[in-house]
Amino acid sequence: MASPVKPPSQAGFTAEPTAPFPWPGTKKEDRDESLFDKVATLGRKKRMKEVADLQEDGKHAIDSPTTSPVSPEIIPDIYNLEENEERSLIEIDSRDDFKLRELIKVLLDWINEELQTHRIIVKDIEEDLFDGQVLGKLVERLANIKLEVAEVTQSEAGQKKKLKAVLDEVNKILNLPRWHQQKWSVDSIHSKNLIAILHLLVALAFHFKAPIRIPEHVAVQVVVLQKKDGMLHTRHVTEEITSTNDAIGGRFERDAFDTLFDHAPDKLSVVKKSLITFVNKHLNKINLEVTDLDTQFCDGVYLVLLMGLLEGYFVPLYCYHLTPTTFEHKVHNVQFALELMHDAGLPKAKARPEDIAQLHVKSTMRILYNIFTKYKQLS
């Protein structure tokens, strides 16, 4: 909106006009130049202010001790705690722990992969899961069920009601002892308690055999707050979120392929080419060729045939599905190939058959590298 026209200064009419009409005694060129100078000056001042603000923001970001991408929890007011009620908070230093960050990233990637057909993208594990909306979709996807809950809830009461229905179904599916269910609750999840959310997601990942490598021995330092006799008491404890991954088939410690994918993606294509060259050296003997490492091993057929060629025997067709048509067929083939590798003395694969069948490239490369290591000198 244009500013109202101000009257000229009464002290000799020295004020500059703000109205668009000509001012007596001035030429058009002078007026245009004067207006241009003003606009240019305002533009320079604005840019200078933006630069100054940017520098100040940068200095604040550098000096600020809270650089964690995970927002720190606010210590609850003592008056919000009931008598004998407890709340736990992760210490700031623990939030920066590498293993904790890795666990969060792995879980986020898994959730987003599971929910991609719903066009749901989870960016913040606390902010996006607390109300039960996304969590409900995840449970429906994993368990192949339909929950009888409201699709969208805005009120806190509605969110908690929906969250309770979701968690009741989760506890029923997991069939956990009562004491274990205390690791999460409606109140803890809805209050965006990171520890409770992580416990819940890890339990779901283990139960449904998620094709992910959950970091082992993830633990955080926690401050436990409790109100007793009207006073706030605190104690420090270590909360273990994950131990080992034996429950889903073997210990999944980080290896060279984790480092390769995380820190040297430029070298990934070189490794892939080397493995493809090795594989084709043998598969070409039966007129087969691999051109895409990422996809051509997911059904297990090439793995089975490769082991037969390397070990010098014919694999009976009734032992595997030569033309697999279902996911179960693919898993069967990969499992059979892993058994052949075990019989040949190869080290236990750090991947599950489901990993390969679901196009988990890192797991595929691990298996092929195991084979390459043993047979690379074979002509």
Image (tube, rainbow, N blue to C red):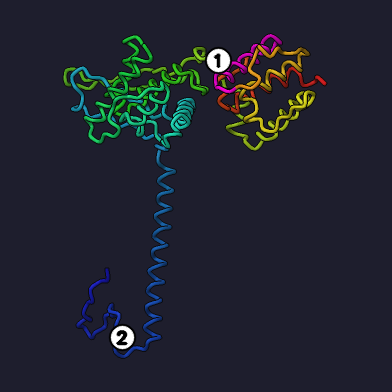
Q: Amino acid at mark 1?
A: Arg
Q: Quadrant of residue 176?
A: top left
Residue 340's disc number: none
User: What residue appears at the point 23 percent right and 32 percent down from the top-left corner?
Assistant: 156
Q: Position of residue 116 (x, y in %)?
A: 46, 34
Q: Quadrant of the C terminus?
A: top right
Q: Is residue 345 left or right of residue 228?
A: right
User: Which structural element holds mark 1?
Assistant: loop
Residue 106 part of the magenta segment: no
Question: Which residue corresponds to mark 2?
Answer: 22
Residue neighbourhood size for the residue with mark 1, other residues' Cα within 10 Å, grouped as few (<14), some (14–19), many (≥20)? some
**Viewer can see residue 341:** no
How far apart are the alpha carbons under marks 2 and 1?
A: 84 Å
| Number of dots carrying numbers | 2
Q: Position of residue 5 (x, y in %)?
A: 23, 76
Question: Which residue corresponds to mark 1?
Answer: 251
Say whether marks 2 and 1 touch (CB < 8 Å).
no
Q: Is residue 343 left or right of residue 194?
A: right
Q: Which residues are magenta?
A: 325-347
User: What residue appears at the point 38 percent right and 14 percent down from the top-left corner?
Assistant: 174
